[in-house]
Image: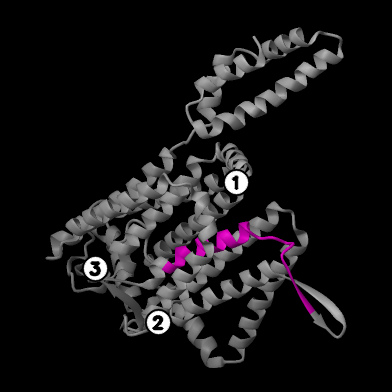
Amino acid sequence: MDIKTFLNEISNEIKYNPVKKGITDELKSHIEEIKQEYVENGIEENEAEEKAVKQMGNATDIGKKLNKIHRPKLDLKLLILIFILIGFGITISILKQSSTNNNYIINTIIYMAIGMILSICIYFVDYKKIKKYSNFIYLFATLLIILSTTEIGLTINSTHFINIFGITFRPITIALPLYIISFAGFISGYNKNNKLKICTNNKEIYLKKDIIKMIILGLLSIALMLYIPSVASAFMLSIVYFIIIFIKLVKEKNTKGLKILLGTLGTIIIIFTISTIRNPYRTYSIFKRIAISYKPEIDSSGRGYTGILQKDILENAKLIGEANTDIIKNENYIINNESNYTFIYLLGKTGIIIAGALVMVIILTSLKLILNAKNIKEEYGKLLTIGLGSLYILESIISVLMNINLGVKIDVDLPFVTYGGVYFIINMLCISIILAVYRRKDIVEYEEERIEENEKNT
């Protein structure tokens, strides 16, 4: 059998067309190397070709194995975990529906349908195409925040909202993941040769444009989060930025960059500590707020009020069933109405075992996201998975700890579980991007080869 026939048989077994040429070209190169070794050992060219092909093995078997490896894959495990989380969210909607006149269940189904339709569309789109729109995505996120501070926006309890066609949502709900997506694009598109020359005192100084751009836009996005204000979002965005940069530098084994990054972080912590210590009132306020989060009795009628309610639910919670407390039965309590208290509400309504099951699913989902990020080879996809996955993990950990009085009270919801239209849809879209990255994890290198070749031909 000659090389052409051998490769055609393999190609016929590979079902995903975009990777066929890349795989067969790679195999052809390998066979040619083996053939050349035979020729150098004195074997005639035709016989050498037959021996090289025979050495490779059965073409049909090879094709089937390659087809199994190099094809789009659905991350079924992650998808199942997400649907379980959504199931908890539906359970909460049913519980709220039974105690109020609001259409929680109908609204949840509508939001789920919208989210699934949009998610399916994103899932089948090549995620790498998002990268070239990083600047536009950043600009859109910034405009959302700015618009919320104008006449178009609404301000409720010092929090900015936007109302479009009767739908009210917080701009940070959309802006936060968009900033992460755009930043992943900036990092993966970094070009160290893109320099800015500055002449001063007869000296030429070269500054790396892309680094300056990332620093300015990164700090601006955090500053806008604080301006809204949303300290929680600014905090989480800062951590996600740090994780993305840290992973990028570790992957490149950039020791100098790591030292600068850690040095910068240390400097910020020192400056914050000094500024806090120099302002006794601020120091007292910060430490008091932290103390109240863990021991709400310190200010039971003020900031510790919700903590007292949470503590009462925790102390009276059953293994299965509703807690023996009026707090969880009376819909007028903040625990039953505010989205931030989803976890403690579920625990009070259903019991410790159900709430514990939710925690287990959250942990398993977090671990799956970490494993996905580890196994993705293509840089942009890896950074997207790290960034959006880190956001989910941070929101989940902060929300659960806050609900059981083991974390500072900040404005963070529980992904996929907390009731909320736009927030729920955005979470689904973020996961669909992660699933889209996973879908192409074993085919992306061959797709890129095909794209590069097409560009050369045109």
- Looking at the image, residue 28 sits to the left or right of residue 327; the answer is right
Residue where numbered disc 2 is placed? 298
Crowdedness near tag 1: few (<14), some (14–19) or many (≥20) residues, C-alpha within 10 Å: some
Q: Nearer the viewer, residue 46 or 301?
A: 46
Q: Position of residue 233 (x, y in %)?
A: 46, 71
Q: Which residues are magenta?
A: 175-198
Q: For the point 55% across and 50% down, which residue is it?
A: 381
Q: Is residue 314 above or below residue 82?
A: below
Q: For the point 57% across and 59% down, which residue is it?
A: 185
Q: Which mark is residue 336?
A: 3
Looking at numbered disc 2 in the image, what kind of residue is underneath it?
Ile
Residue sitting at the far front = 458
Q: Position of residue 143 (x, y in %)?
A: 43, 75
Crowdedness near tag 3: few (<14), some (14–19) or many (≥20) residues, C-alpha within 10 Å: many
Q: Is residue 332 above or below residue 102?
A: below
Residue sitting at the far left = 101
**Residue 105 placement: quadrant:** bottom left
Residue where numbered disc 1 is placed? 378
Q: Secondary structure at mark 3?
A: helix
Q: Secondary structure at mark 1?
A: loop
Of tags 3 and 2, the one toward the viewer is 3
Looking at numbered disc 1 in the image, what kind of residue is underneath it?
Glu
Gap in angstroms between the C-alphas marked 3 and 2: 23 Å
Looking at numbered disc 3 in the image, what kind of residue is underneath it?
Asn
- Looking at the image, residue 319 sits to the left or right of residue 405; the answer is left
Is residue 420 something that shows in the picture? Answer: no
Q: For the point 75% across and 58% down, which residue is it?
A: 254
- Looking at the image, residue 304 sits to the left or right of residue 31; the answer is left
- Looking at the image, residue 458 sits to the left or right of residue 35; the answer is left
